[in-house]
Amino acid sequence: MSTWCSKWLGSPPVRTLFERTHLSTVVGLRLADGREVVVKARPFEHRLAGCLEVQRRMHQAGFPCPEPLAGPEPVDGQGPLRGQVVTAEALVPDGTVLPPRSDAPELFAAALARLMTAAPSVADVPSLAPAPPWNGWDHDDPRPWPWPDDMDVDLNDRPGPGWLDETARRVRTRLRRTALPEVVGHGDFESQNIRWNGDKLHVVHDWDSAVARPEAALAGLAAAVFPAGGPEDRPATVAETERFLAGYVRARGRHWTREESEVAWAAGLWVLAFNAKKASVAQPNGSAAARLAKEVPERLRRADA
């Protein structure tokens, strides 16, 4: 990492501020020239070039996201990061996750609407395909589930709960038949990736999750999961999803067609089903699937799936 920073940022690190590892290795560093940066290493994917260009254009447009500084560039030499690609961005300090509050659906919806207003067009950035599996309903396997992002297991080889597999099939069919145009957006608009100052949006992180999807699908994904990783760390309820979507269309100053509304609900149910399927494999007796089971009929009805 020191060699990479010296080569691509022009200054070696002198202090580690933090380090986290999940799908990527993320390290906060203070460089010898005084700058504080975040360096992120992960396996190579062609879509990363597009993700970084989206982030660069969003920053240039004045949207609150970290400024990209370098990459994606490979790690040379030996060590655990060999063969991975690395990017660097400016560290954005301060801000907090949004605490529980009654108007959270509307605040997150307005933040997403602001993001979508600033986003570049699909034609202006390199390809963002394939989408991450939690919004990858267009994967190539004829079976319902894509390969998960953080588990070395084929979800299709782990049958059940039967209603959950059937939900995935129905929602995937619904989403794949839409002809709505794709736009650039953020595919992981969860509380854990967003920081606030009071009710003012401070910064949106995790631009590796930039995707090209119909706008209604992007709103639906966010509407289903926006509390995740926050103080309550849970999916949104049906009522909260409805309020988010209503707040989103108000913030965008437009009305949705029936098709757009159905696609939004279908996309939200896809990510909830995918997360519940992974949870059922990791913890067969866990509560995630049981919690979703109560909502599936209503969400399927709204998605016309």
Image (cartoon, rainbow, N blue to C red):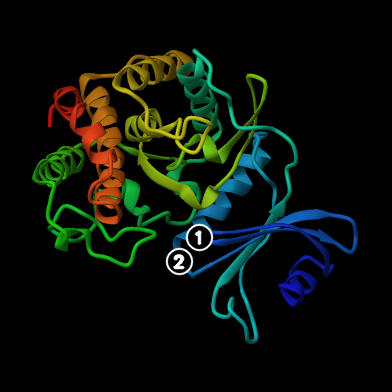
Which residue lies under the disc numbered 1? 48
Amino acid marked by disc 1 = Leu
Amino acid marked by disc 2 = Glu
Which residue lies under the disc numbered 2? 45
Q: Are marks 2 and 1 in contact (CB under 8 Å)?
A: yes
Residue at 24%, 33% (x, y): give it: 292
Q: Position of residue 302 (x, y in %)?
A: 19, 22
Q: Secondary structure at mark 1?
A: helix
Q: Is residue 267 above or below residue 27?
A: above
Q: Residue furthest front?
A: 285
In terms of image quadrants, where is residue 79? bottom right
Q: Secondary structure at mark 2?
A: loop
Residue in the foreground of this view, choosing between 182 and 83 = 83
The number of callouts visible is 2
Q: Position of residue 240 (x, y in %)?
A: 37, 19
- 115 sits left or right of 79 in the view: left
Q: Position of residue 289 (x, y in %)?
A: 23, 40
Q: Is residue 161 visible?
A: yes
